[in-house]
Image: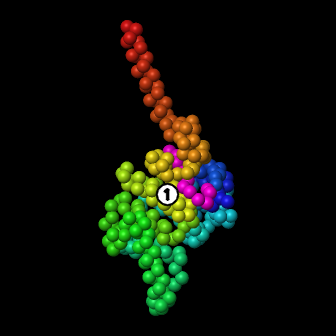
Amino acid sequence: MSRLSLKNVSKSFGGLVAVDDVSFDIVERGVTAIIGPNGAGKTTLFSLISGFLRPSLGKVVFEGEDITGLAPQLVAKRGVVRTFQLVKLFAELSVLDNVKVGRHLHASGGLVAALLRPPAARREEREVEAKARELLAFVGLVAQAEAPATSLGYGQQRLLEMARALAAEPRLLLLDEPAAGLDAAESAALSRLIRSVAEGGTTVLLIEHDMTLVMNTADHVIVVDFGRKIAEGSPEAVRRDPAVIAAYLGSAHQARAGEQGVQAARVAEAGRG
């Protein structure tokens, strides 16, 4: 059974078609990567899946339920949780409290419970904190639990955002360029972390430009260009696909090839002279 299905999804902004008749299925387990050049429509796809945008055409189906056009909080309640290209933390809160915020989808209290703090609410609060600390340990940030979120380095902020997303107990986790700004060592550690998340039963769908991370992490790759899906398959198959090579190299590749040809002709001419 597919965890997520996009069925002929399109999105237009005035006369601009950002996503053009895209269909694919994401299986229940594993890591799928969406790749493509800048401006290919990748983040728009994430916004359509997570409810931040409504498709102009087509359907988004999660675990057999049509969630097309549902508000983001309702999509998240059903188990689809996303991160963003730019880290969005609560700067005034501690690292621990940022993760605790991610549990709000499952909180059963409310305003009265928060004010009166009955035993059930206090017990739930302890459980939320214990889970938050467990997630911080999972991403390697438990030692920074009491520190302000703004005191973390950029790579650590990325990990904190992932911990907060995991606190919502997603069944489908959408990671939008999680390796952006990371060095090689941080990217390798992130790859291992994403694999651990997937092995724990959470389906992961990520957008990423770091091809080393994609090839080492993803089980399946979807390639988009100019809003259309142009290839799909295993990382190795996609890497060899002529349409993918053309999309990534394009005119720059052709220009370099032409320049090399001119240089070779000049060398040959000099040799004849």
Q: Nearer the viewer, residue 98 or 1?
A: 1
Label 1 amino acid?
Arg
- Residue beneath the point at 55% across and 53% down: 32
Residue 157 appears left or right of 56? left
Q: Specify whether residue 23 is in view.
A: yes
| Front residue (pair 241, 92) | 241
Question: In this orientation, which residue lies closer to the viewer: 152 or 75?
Answer: 152
Residue 34 drawn in magenta: yes
In the rendered image, the quadrant that contains the C terminus is top left
Q: Is 153 drawn above or below residue 41 in the view shown?
A: below
Q: Residue at x 46, y 34 (%)?
A: 252
Start and end of the magenta stretch? 26-37
**Which quadrant does the N terminus fall into?**
bottom right
Q: Give the side of residue 14 with respect to residue 160, left or right.
A: right
Residue 224 visible in this rendered orientation of the protein? no
- Quadrant in which residue 191 is drawn: bottom left
> What is the x, y in percent for residue 45?
57, 55
Q: Is residue 213 left or right of residue 27?
A: left
Above/below status of 154 relative to 212 = below
Q: Position of residue 255 (x, y in %)?
A: 46, 30
Q: Residue at x 43, y 72 (%)?
A: 134
- Magenta-colored stretch includes residue 24: no
Disc 1 element: helix
Q: Quadrant of residue 64?
A: bottom right
Residue 113 on image: x %, y %: 49, 88
Crowding around mark 1 (Cα neighbors within 10 Å: few <14, some 14 to 19, many 20+) is: some
Quarter where residue 25 is shown: bottom right
- Residue, disc 1: 195
Q: Most extreme residue toward the top, as rendered? A: 273
- Which residue sits at x=59%, y=51%? 19
Query: Residue 41, image x and y in percent?
Result: 54, 50
